[in-house]
């Protein structure tokens, strides 16, 4: 079992930055690909970005290329999402997710095993 707790959401103006954190419980954090998804009102949950077990490789959606980065600290059981140049269309609930395995290119929500409760990010224009 892995429990995930996100933090760091909030309200920011367009062009601003936020950093989300996701703290994981358990001793096997380094065995999980970590990803971030988001869900806007009335829309399906969508993949944002993911990172492999060691943190050496990331995979991201085209919509966040060049603006969002993901990193992880396996010693602290934590994954981070740095969001820069935020746009109003980035407004959503952001979810941290864990997937047991090696492939960080899986983008379907049903391919992830554990989820956090979500944190709201609102970008004003």
Image (cartoon, grey):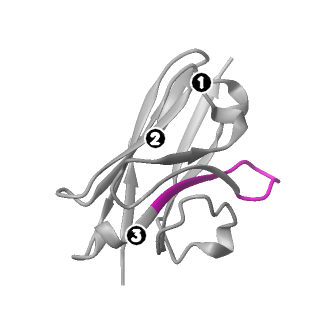
Q: Is residue 82 magenta?
A: no
* Relative to 118, residue 17 above or below: above
Residue 21, percent from left and from top: 36, 47
Magenta stretch, residue numbers: 34-45
Residue density around tag 1, few if under 14, some if 14–19, many if 20 or more, within 10 Å? many
Which residue occupies 70% across, 66% down?
Answer: 108
**Alpha carbon separation for disc pair 3 and 2:** 23 Å
Residue 72, percent from left and from top: 33, 49
Residue, disc 3: 32
**Alpha carbon separation for disc pair 2 and 1:** 13 Å
- Which mark is nearer the camera, 3 or 2? 3
- Element under disc 1: loop
Q: Which is more N-terminal, label 2 or label 3?
A: 2
Q: Which is more N-terminal, label 1 or label 2?
A: 2
Q: The C terminus appears in which quarter of the rendering?
A: top right
Residue, disc 1: 86
Which residue occupies 35% across, 72% down?
Answer: 31
Q: Which is more N-terminal, label 3 or label 1?
A: 3
Name the residue at the right extreme.
Answer: 42
**Count of numbered marks:** 3
Return the mark for residue 34. Answer: none
Residue density around tag 2, few if under 14, some if 14–19, many if 20 or more, within 10 Å? some
Which residue occupies 47% across, 74% down?
Answer: 101
Which residue occupies 66% across, 37% down?
Answer: 91
For the residues labelled 2 and 1, say whether their Cβ atoms are less than 8 Å apart.
no
Residue, disc 2: 9
């Amino acid at each position: 079992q892995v429990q995930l707790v996100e933090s760091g959401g909030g309200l920011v103006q367009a062009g601003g930055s936020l950093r989300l954190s996701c703290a994981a419980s358990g001793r096997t954090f380094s065995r999980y690909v970590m990803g971030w998804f988001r869900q806007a009102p009335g829309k399906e949950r969508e993949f944002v970005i993911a990172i492999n077990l060691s943190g050496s490789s990331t995979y991201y959606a085209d919509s966040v290329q060049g603006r969002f980065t993901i990193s992880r600290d396996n010693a602290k059981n934590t994954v981070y999402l740095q969001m820069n140049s935020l746009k109003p269309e980035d407004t959503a609930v952001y979810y941290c997710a864990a997937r047991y395995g090696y492939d960080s290119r899986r983008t379907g929500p049903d391919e992830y095993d554990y989820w956090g409760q979500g944190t709201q990010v609102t970008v004003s224009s």
